[in-house]
Amino acid sequence: MERYNRITNKNQREIVLLKSRPCAWGKCRFCDYIEDNTLDKNEMLTLNASVLSRVTGEFGVLEVINSGSCFELPVETLALIRTVVREKGIHRLFFEAHWMYRSRLQELRDYMGIPIVYKIGVETFDYDFREHYLNKHADFRSPEEVSRYFDSPCLMVGIKGQTREMITNDITILKEHFHLGTINIFTNNSTEVKRDPELVNWFMDKYRHLLLDPRIEILYEKTDFGVGD
């Protein structure tokens, strides 16, 4: 599994995929990404130190992802990230966190001492689909609630059961309420959730212009950031 990459097009940065404790929620219907975790602390610390040793500070920006939220990384790894930030001249961090951690985001901003862009896996702003089908355990009702805490929502497109109207509304909300965002095209995995190829083709045709939008990153494959497998 590749755990380090350089993103050289939109929002240039280095990105690392670290290993953490299991996702605190871990019940999203569509997700098997949470299997990349461990309860073996030594394994986490050894692997994470090796991955972080590859950071050069080339862009001054670092994104840290793991199979859950940044708050599930060991405290020793968070301390090492802070050391890397200082030694490599990192001036901006990207982290991802679940909605349940919204009241703790300032903790890491204070700890790291630099601006943090917080991503959140919204998947969709359609409450019923998000909560009753995808089982996200993120009970916000409006984009304003999300933007109060988070900077960059991650949307998911191309799931059977989604509609064109849902996606159109999600894209409108993303562009009107947030400065940054990621759109993940759903890929079939080991879960029961399935990809809707017709919906994906419609999206890629209608929203092809977003490929040129500097604020929005589209991941056609889950490894498009160059990490994972």
Image (cartoon, helix red, strand yellow):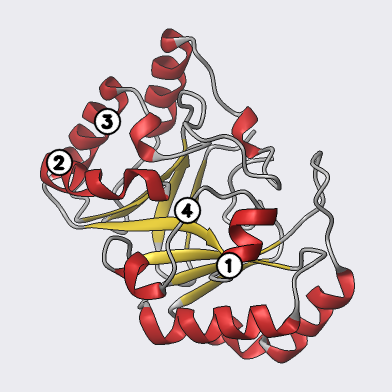
The quadrant of the rendering that contains the C terminus is: top right
Residue 86 is tagged as 2
Which is more toward the observer, 114 or 10?
A: 114
Give the residue displayed 30% in from the left and 50% down from the top. 102
Q: CA distance from mark 4 to mark 3?
A: 25 Å
Give the residue displayed 83% in from the left and 79% down from the top. 201
Residue 78 is tagged as 3
Say if 95 sits above or below 84 in the image. Answer: below
- Which residue lies under the disc numbered 4? 138
Whichever of labels 2 and 1 marks the residue nearer the N terminus, that label is 2
Whichever of labels 4 and 2 marks the residue nearer the N terminus, that label is 2
Residue 148 picture location, percent across and down: 26, 67
Amino acid of disc 1: Thr
Whichever of labels 3 and 2 marks the residue nearer the N terminus, that label is 3
- Which residue lies under the disc numbered 1? 124
Whichever of labels 1 and 3 marks the residue nearer the N terminus, that label is 3
Residue 221 picture location, percent across and down: 71, 58
Amino acid of disc 4: Ala
Mark 4 burial class by Cα count in 10 Å: few <14, some 14-19, many 20+ = some
Which is more toward the observer, 149 or 16?
A: 149
Amino acid of disc 2: Arg
